[in-house]
Image: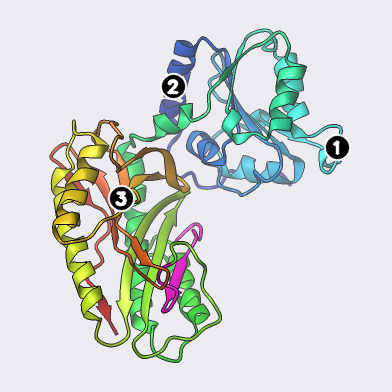
Amino acid sequence: MPIIKGPQAFPRVEFLRRLAAVKSDMVRREIDALLVSDAHNITYLTGYTTPSGYVPEGLVVSIQGEEPTFILRQMDAPAAIHQTFIGRENVIAYPETFIGDHTRNGYDMIIDFLHDKGLARRGIGIEFDNLSSQAATKFRTRLPEARIVDCSNAVTWIRIVKSDLEIAVMREAAAISDAAMLRAAEVIRPGLREADVIAEIAGALARGANGKPGTGIAGITLCSSPRTGTAHIPWSEDVFRPGSQINIELGGVRHGYAVALMRTFSIGEPSKRLRRVHDAHIAGMDAALEAVRPGVACSDVANAFYRTYEKHGFKKDSRCGYAMGIGWLEPTASFQSGDLTELKPNMTFHLMLGNWFDEDFGYVISESILVTDAGVEVLTKTPRKIFEL
């Protein structure tokens, strides 16, 4: 039996709105077709969230067609039919014989499609940043008459301003983040393995909040003393001990949209150093949030944090936030000095104030935020404190 369409995260009109914005950009770039290979951009334009991008696949957006065409591996085609808004006829499967073949792969199928549709002599946009050098060479070699335009990050920049429907989904993801962090606070205790806490966090991320389950598990970072000076290390086989500090970063996920959250925990009374660092971060966060409003630059938000933070005797060398949405981080705007990206309503960011001072000491706190017409809305609601356990 053929697979049926599954529940759609967004109505068809929402996906057509997104495609219209992409097509408007294509007209500006004078291209007739756009090959989208970035998995998060494919999610944005279709609703597809299956992790199949480890093999060649691509979404071809044509100026002429209302729906894009999704070309992917045969065993993943049913997932595309089930998850996306596009019709079955616009999902094209390439055979399994293309897998592991060093002479041809799924990109050849995409190139054949461009030839068959009369697009091989037209303007074609390609997300080259998402391709290997070998794949990029294949496109240039097999499309010698096309005017090829590098469209890396073109769709990503369109994604930076969310629709109200997207914001609603991100609020659901934020509630899941809060539930997972509070679950961590409930279960952490001396003698418990780090892995056991990760299991509880993952369970909370899957169960969700307010009747909305998580639809994916984003990367979870957990480190305890003496590893809190590391930023992205995974959990270990160690157990928590009296006096341990624990840093956690997690993110609830709904339909591909991730909302991040970081908090610091202490088994027993926090050290004076940790309290000083925490107080400085809270003051800096308040200053950064106060600076967020439409029309200001990302660097203005960053500098508001840095100035306040330095008044408390500390310095942070890394950026203090980044655009957030599908797949967690959007590689566009950052809260850092020199980023002049103008804030607009319905942009979302992870205001990430983690700082790593020594090899064995660091501190984390963050909020996920929404730029509003009036200023800022903090999407995450977990208490802004050191959790004393």
Q: Type of residue at label 1?
A: His
Image x and y of residue 161, in percent: 33, 34
Q: Looking at the rendering, which quadrant does residue 380 occupy?
A: bottom left
State the SS at label 1.
Answer: loop
Compare residues 300 and 62 and report the one nearer the observer.
300
Q: Residue at x 18, y 42 (%)?
A: 292
Looking at the image, tell me whether mark 1 or mark 2 is earlier in sequence order.
2
Image: magenta residue range: 214-229
Magenta run includes residue 290 = no
Q: Answer yes or no: is residue 210 visible.
A: no
Residue 320, disc? 3
Q: Is residue 351 left or right of residue 19?
A: left
- Spatial CA distance of label 3 from label 2 is 33 Å
Cβ atoms at labels 3 and 2 below 8 Å apart:
no
Quadrant of the image for the C terminus? bottom left
State the SS at label 3.
Answer: loop
